[in-house]
């Protein structure tokens, strides 16, 4: 029998409905895989085997009655940013020590309503601030991929590094993730998985720990395009508890997988050819263009002139919103509390001890750009640039472009504790250079595996769509996936 953890969500769903395998058997296979691998890969910060077994048992009962939901019996990992009732939810930060919410995030509640099984909470960069999963209080996640002939531990990308690594290593069938500036698409590209950031407002943010509220959006990381479509259908919904969620019918995304792209106009933005971009990234991009052209799409050169301002504008807007959102963590009601001479000293000691270095850096940047005398010069100007970035996309789509094709990352996965990255935060921030524009404009974007680097590690391409047109992204991404094939790391853990 095939290793049960090797099944995609679609394959597992069909086997479960046919009663070839039970949800309990599938769940046990994943629990066993996590037990064997997690000490090495560090993907999970909390494993919930008993809860998973109970949920799987309930799924088996519903399947027996013919009442299976869309994700019935499918074992998933949940990023530690999503509130899960009675279960560890700390955004991988020391400041939220021992926090177990009494409520469930809307996204995870939607998944459980469709019959999914929770395996546990996945590692991530602290408060989703990072591009390598090295800022987590629980230590870095190791990418299950390694370079040819090397034992060097590589980063899985961030902030959803635990989600991407767990999916790539077959430690869950799929995973929830969030994307504020690339935190779904960048780790998906570095681990050979598929990750989609849907349109802002497509998934509820309620019950998800906030980083930058105007940029954050939940989405899935999965093994292939079909699985990502299946998961997004369950995750997406309107939600009266989130005023930014949009009241639009959620389409059957899976139906668009494999749809013809003949006649689609795919834009290639010239501004994404950045200085110093490795030749293999350019070659990958050209290969993606050729695949789409062969499938009948028309390739059009386009311009997004304000792209070069996106990264600096993002690193003003996002920290500003973070400094506001993270003000609530003070040691008074929940989480870590450090002793102090008085309440102010207690606040200061708690925040100094509880937040990691990167989170402190971004809070300080955010507080600075919002302060009197600097608000107009930085924050207000960044918001004006954001409007121009959004307008660039609107102009391109108004000209009849259906989607844009770009690289997903400027390079393949780099080493954990890479001295170059550690010594210069800006070099780390540059990992988001191809992804932040999508968040600034509130658009959907998908990362799909497209090849391997010269060192044998995954590389991905990104497709950017019109607002609420995720269906075109799934159709186009499936063309690339069919041409490129799927990628699985050689097991060494």
Image (tube, helix red, strand yellow):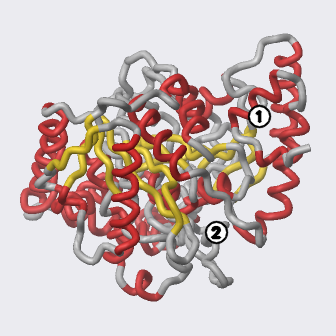
Judged from the image, the secondary structure of the residue bearing numbered disc 1 is: helix
Instruction: Indicate the position of residue 10 as horizontal and vertical percent values.
Output: 69, 32
Give the side of residue 438 with respect to residue 416, left or right: left
Residue 159 seen from this side: no
Q: Which residue is mark 1?
A: 12
Q: Is residue 84 left or right of residue 481?
A: right
Residue at 85 percent of width and 63 percent of height: 36
Q: Which residue is depicted at the point 77% across and 52% down?
A: 47
User: Above or below — where is 109 with respect to 422?
Assistant: above
Mark 2 Cα within 10 Å, few/some/many (few <14, many 20+)? many
Please determine whether, in this image, residue 356 is positioned above or below residue 370: below
Asked if disc 1 and disc 2 are in contact, CB closer than 8 Å, the reply is no
Above or below, 118 against 211 in this view is above
> Which residue occupies 13% across, 41% down?
391
Residue corresponding to mark 2: 145
Residue 317, located in which quarter of the rendered image? Answer: bottom left
Is residue 441 among the parts visible in the rendering?
Answer: yes
User: What is the number of callouts on the image?
Assistant: 2
Residue 60 image point, x, y percent: 87, 24
In front of the other: 403 or 135: 403
Up-down: is 139 above or below 243?
A: below
* Quarter in which the N terminus is drawn: top right
Label 1 neighbour load within 10 Å: few <14, some 14-19, many 20+: many
């Amino acid at each position: 029998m095939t290793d049960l953890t090797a099944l995609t969500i679609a394959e597992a769903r069909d086997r479960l409905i046919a009663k070839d395998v039970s949800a309990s058997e599938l769940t046990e296979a994943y629990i066993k895989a996590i037990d064997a691998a997690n000490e090495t890969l560090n993907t999970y910060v909390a494993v919930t085997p008993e809860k998973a077994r109970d949920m799987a048992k309930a799924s088996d009962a519903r399947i027996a009655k013919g009442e299976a939901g869309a994700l019935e019996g499918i074992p998933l990992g949940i990023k530690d940013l999503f509130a899960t009732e009675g279960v560890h939810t700390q955004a991988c930060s020391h400041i939220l020590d021992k926090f177990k919410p009494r409520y469930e995030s809307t996204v995870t509640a939607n998944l459980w309503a469709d019959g999914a099984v929770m395996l546990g909470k996945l590692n991530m960069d602290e408060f989703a601030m990072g591009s390598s999963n090295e800022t987590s209080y629980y230590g870095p996640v190791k990418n299950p991929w390694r370079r040819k002939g090397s034992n060097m531990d590589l980063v899985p990308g961030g902030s959803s590094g635990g989600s991407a690594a767990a999916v790539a290593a077959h430690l869950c069938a799929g995973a929830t993730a969030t994307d504020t500036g690339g935190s779904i698409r960048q780790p998906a590209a570095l681990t050979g998985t598929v990750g989609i950031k849907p349109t802002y407002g497509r998934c509820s943010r309620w019950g998800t720990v906030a980083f930058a509220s105007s940029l954050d959006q939940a989405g899935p990381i999965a093994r292939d395009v079909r699985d990502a479509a299946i998961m997004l259908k369950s995750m997406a919904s309107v939600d009266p508890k989130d005023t930014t969620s949009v009241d639009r019918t959620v389409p059957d995304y899976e139906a668009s997988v494999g749809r013809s792209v003949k006649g689609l106009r795919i834009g290639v933005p010239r501004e994404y050819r950045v200085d110093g971009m490795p030749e293999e990234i350019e070659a990958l991009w050209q290969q993606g263009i050729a695949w789409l052209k062969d499938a009948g799409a028309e390739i059009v050169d386009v311009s997004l002139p304000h792209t070069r301002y996106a990264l600096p504008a993002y690193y003003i807007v996002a920290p500003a919103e973070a400094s506001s959102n993270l003000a609530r963590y003070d040691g008074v009601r929940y989480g870590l509390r450090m002793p102090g001479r008085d309440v102010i000293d207690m606040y200061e000691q708690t925040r100094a001890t509880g937040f990691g270095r990167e989170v402190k850096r971004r809070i300080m940047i955010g507080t600075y750009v919002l302060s009197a005398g600097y608000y107009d010069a930085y924050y207000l100007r960044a918001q004006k640039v954001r409007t121009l970035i959004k307008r660039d996309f609107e102009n391109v789509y108004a000209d009849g472009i259906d989607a844009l094709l770009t690289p997903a990352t400027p390079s393949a996965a780099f080493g954990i504790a890479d001295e170059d990255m550690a010594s210069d935060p800006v070099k780390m921030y540059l990992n988001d250079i191809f992804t932040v524009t999508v968040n600034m404009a509130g658009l959907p974007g998908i990362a799909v595996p497209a090849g391997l680097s010269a060192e044998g590690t995954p590389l991905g391409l990104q497709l950017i769509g019109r607002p609420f047109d995720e269906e075109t992204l799934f159709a186009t991404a499936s063309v690339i996936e069919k041409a490129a094939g799927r990628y699985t790391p050689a097991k060494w853990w």
